[in-house]
Image (tube, grey):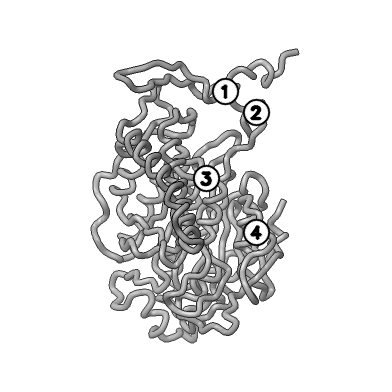
């Protein structure tokens, strides 16, 4: 009997016809055949699993526990008013409440300490302090180096400074606020369609790769004439150059055919400037749709979306104060027990979170969806923003991480460290760390209830 794997063992997704055209190598790739997958289309024929992807999503100013925290835990949890928008994606995600960030001896830096702890595991001691590296960077080092872009960061509020991703205090990954610019970056002149019948390496990329090779050769000589401290600094710098070298190599290699990668239409125009909730929503959805296809076409495996800044300045039509100001100045309506306008802003944010999750779930991949092979980690800066609380910080995850994560659950953290959710995410993405975080935020305890 000839099995699928033995019958096609001489074929691979990199099997191509090779030739030359005007001095450049040209290859004609095979289409995505069934033999490239296993018998039930859940993995590659080689036995390798579908690639894992990671995403982060951020919204500012937390929530109001009275209308956010479900009364039931586990599966089948209820949806209070602020969570109503997630109803259509409830079974594809998890809700985490009653987890705390700890500042230890550091001050509680308003709208800063909370997100720094949940993204790095460490409490900052000053507003300019960015300890460690953010979780997405750690994951990108693990799964992002084989793609064209190790990670891609965007923001829906129109301000490129709104970023929750950084390598260190001096290396922040700026967010792209323009759908047009994002399209040009991902699908512009240097984009190689994995399903195109032929492949011609870009002369521009070839030239850049050649220049970089020369630079890398020079670094070997430089390191022999400088001191140990400078060698350490240069080593960190050259790590970035080596990552760039790998990106060039990737762009000069015929990409594998990808059935779910479809042509992307260039946006007609960017949304008008502005931070009113409708404009932010349009920008968010345009950027989301581009990120989805960037992941589907394997241009990147790590994406970051910022719906707003931590001190969100989103505006509601007919209301004179932005979201951040409302959380501090709007009086509590004692009949309902919370600030109704502030809650309205939170509900709009979570509508966009639901859109983000749903967008990835609509792409079929193998016998499941793109979201099934992802883990998206969503966090905020505070619990109750009105008092700058860093206890009871809500979080979400979406996706099944390649079948390693249960979904459709509400998890009560019982006052434990919020870093447990980040630590769980790191482990699921293959980042080999015995623990994550420092001092009271240090944890080696994953959220076991969600693990398969």
| Residue tagged 1 | 12
The residue carrying mark 2 is 46
Residue 361, numbered circle: 3
How far is disc 3 from disc 2 in space, using C-alphas? 25 Å
Q: Few, some or many C-alpha atoms within 10 Å of disc 4 (few <14, some 14-19, many ≥20)?
A: many
Q: Secondary structure at mark 1?
A: loop
Closer to us: 368 or 223: 223
Residue found at x 54% / y 54%: 376
User: How far is disc 4 from disc 3 in space, using C-alphas?
Assistant: 22 Å
Q: Of callouts 3 and 1, which one flags the residue occurring earlier in the amino acid sequence?
A: 1
| Residue at horizontal 45 percent and vertical 51 percent from the top | 238
What residue is disc 4 on? 424
Q: Position of residue 269 (x, y in %)?
A: 24, 48
N-terminal-most mark, 1 or 4: 1
Task: Check whether the beta carbons of the residues at disc 1 and disc 2 lie within 8 A of each other.
Answer: yes
Foreground tag (1 vs 4): 1
Residue 219: x percent and y percent?
43, 48
First in sequence, mark 1 or 2: give its number.
Answer: 1
């Amino acid at each position: 009997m000839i099995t699928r794997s033995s019958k096609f063992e001489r074929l691979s997704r990199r099997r191509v016809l090779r030739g030359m055209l005007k001095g450049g190598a040209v290859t004609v790739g095979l289409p995505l055949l069934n033999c490239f997958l296993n018998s039930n289309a859940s993995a590659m024929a080689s036995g390798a699993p579908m690639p894992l992807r990671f995403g982060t999503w951020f919204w500012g100013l937390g929530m109001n526990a009275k209308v956010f925290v479900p009364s039931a835990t586990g599966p089948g949890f209820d949806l209070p008013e602020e969570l109503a928008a997630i109803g259509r994606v409830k079974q594809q995600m998890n809700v985490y409440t009653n987890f705390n960030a700890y500042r230890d001896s550091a001050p509680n830096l308003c709208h800063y300490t909370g997100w720094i702890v949940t993204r790095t595991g460490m409490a900052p001691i000053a507003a300019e302090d960015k300890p460690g590296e953010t979780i997405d960077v750690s994951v990108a080092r693990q799964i992002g180096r084989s793609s064209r872009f190790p990670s891609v960061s965007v923001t829906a509020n129109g301000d490129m400074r709104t970023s929750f991703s950084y390598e260190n205090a001096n290396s922040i990954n700026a967010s792209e606020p323009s759908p047009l610019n994002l399209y040009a970056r991902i699908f512009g002149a240097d984009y190689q369609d994995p399903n195109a019948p032929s492949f011609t390496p870009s002369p521009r990329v070839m030239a850049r790769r050649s220049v970089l090779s020369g630079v890398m050769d020079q670094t070997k000589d430089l390191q022999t004439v400088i001191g140990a401290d400078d060698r350490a600094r240069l080593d960190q710098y050259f790590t970035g150059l080596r990552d760039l070298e790998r990106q060039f190599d990737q762009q000069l290699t015929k990409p594998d055919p990808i059935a779910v990668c479809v042509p992307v239409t260039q946006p007609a125009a960017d949304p008008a400037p502005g931070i009113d909730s409708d404009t932010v929503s349009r920008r968010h959805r345009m950027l989301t749709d581009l990120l989805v296809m960037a992941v589907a076409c394997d241009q990147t495996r790590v994406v970051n979306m910022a719906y707003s800044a931590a001190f969100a300045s989103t505006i509601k039509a007919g209301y004179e104060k932005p979201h951040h100001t409302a959380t501090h100045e709007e009086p509590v309506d004692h009949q309902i027990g919370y600030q109704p306008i502030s809650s309205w802003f939170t509900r709009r944010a979570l509508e966009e979170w639901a859109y983000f999750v749903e967008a990835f779930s609509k792409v079929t991949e193998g016998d499941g969806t793109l979201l099934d092979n992802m883990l998206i980690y969503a966090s905020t800066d505070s619990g109750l923003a009105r008092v700058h609380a860093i206890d009871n910080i809500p979080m979400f995850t979406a996706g099944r991480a390649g079948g390693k994560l249960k979904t459709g659950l509400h998890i009560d953290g019982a006052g434990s460290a919020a870093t447990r959710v980040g630590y769980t995410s790191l482990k699921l993405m293959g980042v080999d760390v015995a623990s994550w975080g420092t001092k009271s935020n240090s944890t080696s305890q994953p959220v076991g209830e969600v693990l398969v």
